[in-house]
Amino acid sequence: MSLAKTPAPPYLAVIFTSARTEGDRGYEAMAERMVALAEGQPGFLGMDSVRGEVGVGITVAYFRDEAAIAQWRAHPEHRVAQREGRETWYADYEVRVARVERAYGKER
Amino acid sequence: MSLAKTPAPPYLAVIFTSARTEGDRGYEAMAERMVALAEGQPGFLGMDSVRGEVGVGITVAYFRDEAAIAQWRAHPEHRVAQREGRETWYADYEVRVARVERAYGKER
């Protein structure tokens, strides 16, 4: 897995931190499907996602603008996943929407 | 491990994504020390950090303002860790500084 490479700021980041409940209960298949769906969204710029051994995960998805975020949030399949996330998969989560103002990498 | 609970926006998020090189070479001890140091910084609001099985990690640190970020970035021990990170521990990394504009959690 490699790191997301995004265009020059400004753009938006949706920071999703979560703690999973026990057991899969359809989670892995949904997660894969959501990545594929997100990648097809207009204005989607990339994503970094990691889940650790103790069930805590961080996903940061990058979008061009608020319209792209609104469209992704309202996607019918994503809405079903959001509800299932609240009810079944996540013991806790936090969503933060942030405007990336500057960025730099190892090579720059 | 639980999720960081931050005050109401606005505040800043430093999103650090990284890919580790092979072997520890002092990394784990440094990482623990940096968390302890960051927690003592004025204006530090919390942190979420996860590293996955394939060596990719995401750390998101939350700060009150730019002054707090500048102070943390310039901390002498942190500067040593930054240099060692570039030279030894990280095959790749990306730092994004973002302004959190809104946030919501499972219970709200």
Image: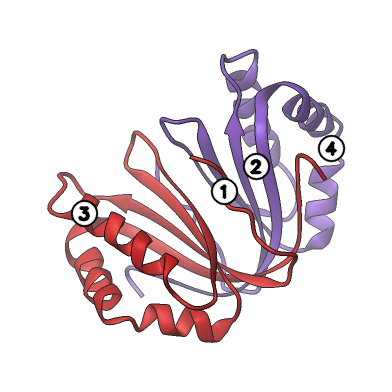
Chain colours: A red, B purple
Label 4 with label 3: CB-CB less than 8 Å: no
Left or right relative to B96: residue A77 = left
**What subunit carries mark 1?**
B
Disc on res. B47: 1
Quadrant hosting residue B40: top right
Give the distance between the C-alpha atoms of the residues marked 1 and 4, in whole angstroms. 17 Å
> What residue is shown at x 70% (from left), y 35% (from top)?
B37
Residue occupied by mark 4? B75
Residue occupied by mark 2? B39
**What subunit carries mark 3?**
A
Give the distance between the C-alpha atoms of the residues marked 3 and 2, in whole angstroms. 37 Å
Q: Is residue A18 above or below residue A42?
A: above
Q: Are marks 3 and 2 on the same chain?
A: no
> Marks 4 and 3: which is nearer the front?
3
Give the distance between the C-alpha atoms of the residues marked 4 and 2, in whole angstroms. 13 Å
Q: Determine crowd level at label 2: few under 14, some 14-19, many 20+ residues with C-alpha closer than 10 A.
A: some
Amino acid type, mark 4: His
Give the distance between the C-alpha atoms of the residues marked 3 and 1, in whole angstroms. 29 Å
**What subunit carries mark 2?**
B
> What residue is shown at x 84% (from left), y 37% (from top)?
B75
Label 2 with label 1: CB-CB less than 8 Å: yes
Precedes in sequence: disc 1 or disc 4: 1
Amino acid type, mark 2: Glu
Left or right relative to A11: residue A108 = right
**What subunit carries mark 4?**
B
Left or right relative to A106: residue A66 = left
> What residue is shown at x 78% (from left), y 53% (from top)?
B69
